[in-house]
Amino acid sequence: MTPLKNIRNFSIVAHIDHGKSTLADRLIQVTGGLTVREMKEQVLDSMELERERGITIKAQTVRLKYEAKDGETYILNLIDTPGHVDFTYEVSRSLYACEGALLVVDASQGVEAQTLANVYQAIDVDLEIVPVLNKIDLPAADPDRVKAQIEDVIGIDASDAIEISAKTGMGVPDVLEAIIARLPAPKGDETAPLKALLVDSWYDPYLGVVVLVRIYDGVMKKGMRIRMMGAKATYTLEQVGVSTPKKTPVDELGPGEIGYFTASIKEVAETAVGDTITEEKRPCEKALPGFKPSVPVVFCGIFPVDAADFEDLREAMGRLRLNDSSFEYEMETSAALGFGFRCGFLGLLHLEIIRERLEREFNLDLITTAPSVVYDIFLTDGEKIELHNPADMPDPVRIDHIEEPWIKATIMAPDEYLGGILKLCEERRGVQKDLTYAGSRAMVVYELPLNEVVFDFYDRLKSISKGYASFDYQLIDHRAESLVKMQILVNEEPVDALSIIVHRDKAEARGRAMCEKLKDLIPRHQFKIPVQAAIGGRVIARETIAALRKDVTAKCYGGDATRKRKLLEKQKEGKKKMRQFGRVEIPQEAFIKALKIDS
Amino acid sequence: MTAPLGVYVHWPYCARICPYCDFNVYKNRPVDAGAWGQALTRDLEHYAKRTQGRKLQSLYFGGGTPSLAPIPVIESVIEVCARLWGFEDGAEITLEANPTDAEQSRFEAFAGAGVNRLSLGVQSLRDGALQFLGRDHDAAAAIRAIEAAQKAFPRVTFDLIYARPGQSLDHWRAELAEALALGASHLSLYQLTIEPGTAFDVAVDKGRWAPAGDDLCADMFDAAQEMTAAAGLPAYEISNHAAPGEESRHNLIYWTYGDYVGAGPGAHGRLTENGARIAVETPLSPKDYLAGAPHEETALSPREAEMERLSMGLRLHKGVAFAETDAFFAEAGAYEKLDRLVGDGLLHWDGRTLCAAADGRRLLNRVLYELFG
């Protein structure tokens, strides 16, 4: 057990690409957590996808042993946090387990929207913040400007910000010393009953569910019977350990320490993040305040391209859910796409990550329907329905009004892109709340309907700003709006997978765009095919796919009988990738393209 | 009565490879006439044993450019066929030729060997188009060749390719009118299609030019139907037009799904043995073929045979025998499929014969897809 004064628990707060993972790697390397041979680039981001995208999805933790200049040995626990808006919730609980945070800002790019969101969270939970300017070796680095920006925008003192290059290792020892000198040691009482916070949990194929904990009071030991106070469940601890970042069993974890345990827990769902863990026979009196559970805000349907893959998809979803309880799914049937699942996500990136993992790790071909948000439908009889799927929209005559979620979005970008960004926000029914400058960077705050953001907002923002804009948001409230369900009819048949809920003022433009797109995506048939967008019974846009007039092989002789037969057999196989609407066959490909959000 | 029987002989060499052609062809080279004669004889003997007691309705030399083959090879094949099977009365012996002067000089020899029908690859009567199509002749040579062929052979047919890039409907009408005035009793009119792996495929892929749209192709097709009918050479198959009685007997074997023997590299055959259809394919490469590499044989299931029979038979204006006892009706949903296509006006069925309506012929790939896809 480590004396409290020799423990420091900290997080790193940074925008994507500002060097958080590189710094973390450096700290691990400098303190000897891993040998160079073991050191792979960005060890904390262990998930393949995380590495590829350079982002952290799950919170990770590492315990570093550091011999400081004062001659004492310290235990530094680094909790790496996700950097993306979708995972704000995971950030908040990671921060909660720390006493301090390093605020890493790229010395040439300055503060970004995500930096802001995360640093405010750190300030909210009273963390001591040490600003660190990274990439100081780059020619474009401008530390004085960035320091001034940190003071202006965030409102913390940046005069003694540490200037480093995580890449070359320059300044990294100063960071370690600052962690000792400037971050407070944790407090706690080892003689008191056990009180620990369940920070995170994940599924390990060898160990089962692994729980990440922060000890506040008391001691956690192998073999101990523990109680999860919220879940009211008891378990016997099988293994107690720390991550260096290799999992290393220890005898016990004392106050202020961060570690993990296993206890024959089968599913991540049994472990509520934010729960308080205590000893069964000597429980603590009061639980920790805990967290609000994360709620999915973006929904979409996920269907296998080949209907035969449905069971594989179900199993894959179950496996992912083991490790990510914020991802929700339930079975859905679509006339267009067959059997699949309605899935809920924390945000668009979360959606994309889950979909990619399903395709990549489980080798599935999927169709994802247009993302949608949760609408509150107030019926005339006073009942309220939460609508996750436009296909389930009740009859409009039963609806009194519909409310949709709104967000507060913070966008930061060089001012030359401001005009385009404001236009985009206005087009998306945004309400401007604030517009300020820090140097040549503008920060604009808008209130926007989430449904306008899930539909290609982020991609548009990136293209308008050539990638320089950063964006973050939080849900604020639900507002009553004039929303309607728009259906797409192909040859008079409604195609459920293409239904969307849209603001009345936007319906016509969206309908027209969808019809035009489908006109190019649906192959010509031997008859003409009307493609219509409709609200209720009223058609608001229409295109016609002309009838195919000629499709016949010119030369067909003795050797072509075989060719013809093989082609028909191939077409029969290809038919599995077609969806039948009345007499119209729509290739799966067309759905994928029609639903793909373009810029 | 046994089904009609024909023999197809593939000569795989050409003076140059046309940019639209995806046949099994190779650049011309000096050949060992003796070796070819032996290899072809070996195949013909093999298949003659399997079709014993039947006479040939047709022999067809295709390619490639069989008019470049050594004359003794052509002579020996005809002699061997006569010895092994014998020809029915009025049997057709066709040879494909290009309208170059060099080939024209051999017409008499071919006729002397027994060839009684010449099929000329004219392709166009426009010099620019012939260049675009990578042909070795010009329009004047084509006309000379047609005239010479008409003197040398009792029956002459020639091919044209339409829907070339830049060709308008009026251009096509004018060209076809000139072709009809040349007095052939049979014409094959092919829409230019871009086949995978050809030089044209590469060019289109690179965006050098675009093939004609299907509306224009449909208009050109319709114009050809109307003009050939008016000239007394109505269509009897999707791309083939003939004066009554002048239809290609050989090709009718394919379209009526009769039996045929294929000899030469990459040639296909269909045999009926113990009531089952056998698909035969010889090795593609001339070298393997000459070395006697084995032929590929596949026994077709009743459904596969039905697919082939209808794919071929529906191309004919007269249609194809089609009754409820056919394999097609063994599949679930057969009646619904048929009803829809009849309802769309693409097919006619009287319970015995199924034939494609005018719109159905133009959309025959679609019709087959609906029937079997």
Image: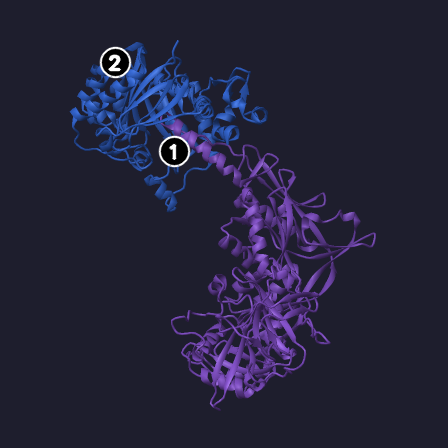
Coordinates of residue B165 in the picture (x, y in percent): 39, 38
- According to the rendering, which colour does chain B have? blue
Task: Decide if residue A18 is in sight here.
Answer: no
Image position of A527 (left or right of A387): left
- Residue B282: quarter of image: top left
Which SS class for mark 1? loop
* The N terminus of chain B lies in quadrant: top left
The disc placed on residue B192 is: 1
Task: Decide if residue A367 is in sight here.
Answer: yes
Name the residue: 58% across, 48% down. Answer: A303
- Residue A423: quarter of image: bottom right
- According to the rendering, which colour does chain A have? purple
- In front here: B37 or B145? B37
The residue carrying mark 2 is B84
Q: Which chain hosts label 2?
A: B
The disc placed on residue A529 is: none
Q: Is residue B326 above or below residue A420?
A: above
For marks 2 and 1, the one nearer the N-term is 2
